[in-house]
């Protein structure tokens, strides 16, 4: 299996204006740079918020077990929070922790007035039910956007703390200037935390509270026959792949000028070097010769997910989403990162 490791990505990025035939290679969407810009914007916003006499926003992560990837993800989130000016805490539990212990911790954080955002790092050990833990986090502190209240509001195109990866995809598309109104979009992947909400943002009405993208959207998944998947993707102006299948999207599956957003990330062994590396769902080098826009892996959607987590934390701190109209503290702060993507 041919892989598209970071060395190949850097090579393509450096030759972004290399001509192949009579057309330029795709513009590589630098998610890391865009995320850095967003974090700087949020840092200024946080400084203004604190200067008005408010305390700094506070984010608490709950980490269970010793999964190396989860440790790295939480560490990266805490580093981003520091850049923005968000105070952080990581609460660690052993792999053997039971559900009651976790629920007690989450309940305590829900009632702690000095905690604005709570994230329970996934995945959790098999003996713990993820949905139970996600639903235990109070909706107004659910900065991952996984509580069913936030999911329901998101699907109804209402203001909420939305899921961070879909919000990051939306922001990449918006800031890159990729047109979406009336365009054909295909989402490869239907996970409840990524694929489904990305599809919702692509197809929903821009006039709604989530400022969605008005595209005509098709959802494909693991049981979509390859020949049918190709039929759908060949007609797509925008392809968002979040299947976690290396090289799922090939050059002969897209039309010239398409925008390719690669959310997939899988660790594989590069046969050329015998070393492990991270790859996406897209055959980056070949697809970049046909597409107009493309995101790399890593360095594309990943940094945007972290940036959106920081924005959700600030929105939560400012109580910018009204969950209970009887709550006297529920005041709309319109500058809260504009709330919408």
Image (cartoon, rainbow, N blue to C red):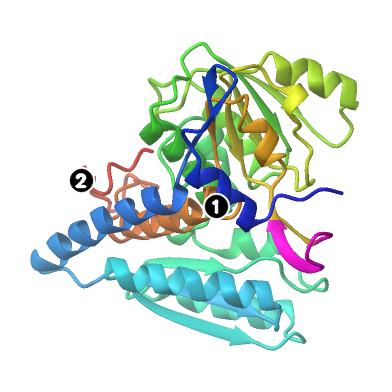
What range of the chain is rendered magenta? 270-278
Please give the residue where the numbered disc 1 appears in the rendered image.
Answer: 10
Which is more toward the observer, 266 or 44? 266
Vertical arrangement, residue 76 with respect to residue 38, above or below: below
Residue 1: % across, % down: 87, 49
Which is more toward the observer, 173 or 25? 25
Total numbered labels placed on residues in the image:
2
Helix, strand or loop status at disc 2: loop
Please give the residue where the numbered disc 2 appears in the rendered image.
Answer: 335
Vertical arrangement, residue 300 with respect to residue 181, above or below: below
Specify whether residue 271 is painted magenta: yes
| Quadrant of the snapshot with the C terminus | top left
Specify whether residue 43 is painted magenta: no
In the displayed image of the protein, which residue is found farthest to the left?
52
At label 2, counting other C-alpha atoms closer than 10 Å, the crowd grade (few under 14, some 14-19, many 20 or more) is few
Name the residue rendered at 58%, 53% in the picture: 146
Name the residue rendered at 20%, 56% in the picture: 45
Q: Quadrant of residue 338?
A: top left
Which is more toward the observer, 303 or 131? 303
Vertical arrangement, residue 166 with respect to residue 43, above or below: above
Name the residue rendered at 32%, 58% in the picture: 39
Q: CA distance from mark 1 to mark 2?
A: 36 Å
Name the residue rendered at 38%, 27% in the picture: 177
Residue 106: % across, % down: 55, 74
Q: Earlier in the sequence, mark 1 or mark 2?
A: 1
Q: Is residue 144 visible?
A: yes
Number of the front mark, 1 or 2? 1
Residue 309: % across, % down: 44, 57
* Label pair 1/2, CB-CB below 8 angstroms: no
Residue 96: % across, % down: 77, 87
């Amino acid at each position: 299996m041919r892989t598209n490791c970071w060395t190949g990505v850097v090579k393509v990025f450096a030759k972004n204006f290399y001509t192949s035939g009579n057309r330029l290679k795709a513009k590589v969407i630098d998610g890391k740079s865009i995320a850095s810009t967003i974090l700087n914007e949020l840092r200024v916003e946080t400084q203004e918020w604190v200067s008005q006499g408010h305390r700094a926003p506070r984010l608490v992560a709950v980490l269970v077990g010793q999964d190396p990837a989860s440790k790295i993800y939480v560490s990266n989130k805490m580093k981003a929070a520091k850049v923005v000016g968000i105070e952080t805490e990581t609460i660690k539990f052993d792999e053997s922790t039971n559900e009651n212990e976790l629920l007690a911790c989450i309940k305590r954080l829900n009632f702690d007035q000095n905690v604005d955002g709570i994230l329970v790092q996934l995945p959790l050990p098999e003996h713990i039910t993820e949905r139970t833990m996600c639903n235990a986090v109070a909706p107004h502190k659910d900065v991952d956007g996984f509580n069913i209240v936030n999911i329901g509001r998101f699907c109804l195109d209402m203001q909420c703390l939305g899921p961070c990866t879909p919000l990051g995809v939306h922001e990449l598309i918006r800031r890159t200037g990729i047109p979406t109104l009336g365009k054909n979009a295909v989402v490869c992947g239907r996970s409840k935390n990524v694929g489904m909400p990305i599809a919702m943002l692509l197809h929903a009405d821009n006039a709604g509270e989530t400022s969605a993208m008005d595209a005509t959207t098709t959802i494909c998944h693991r049981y979509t026959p390859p020949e049918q998947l190709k039929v759908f993707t060949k007609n797509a102006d925008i392809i968002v792949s979040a299947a976690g299948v290396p090289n799922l999207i090939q050059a002969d599956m897209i039309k010239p000028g398409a925008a390719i957003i690669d959310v997939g990330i899988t660790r594989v062994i590069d046969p050329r070097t015998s070393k492990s590396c991270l790859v996406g769902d897209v055959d980056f080098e070949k697809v970049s010769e046909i597409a107009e826009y493309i995101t790399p892996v890593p360095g594309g959607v990943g940094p945007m997910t972290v940036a959106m987590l920081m924005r959700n934390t600030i929105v939560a701190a400012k109580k910018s989403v009204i969950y209970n109209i009887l709550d006297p503290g529920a005041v709309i702060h319109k500058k809260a990162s504009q709330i919408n993507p």
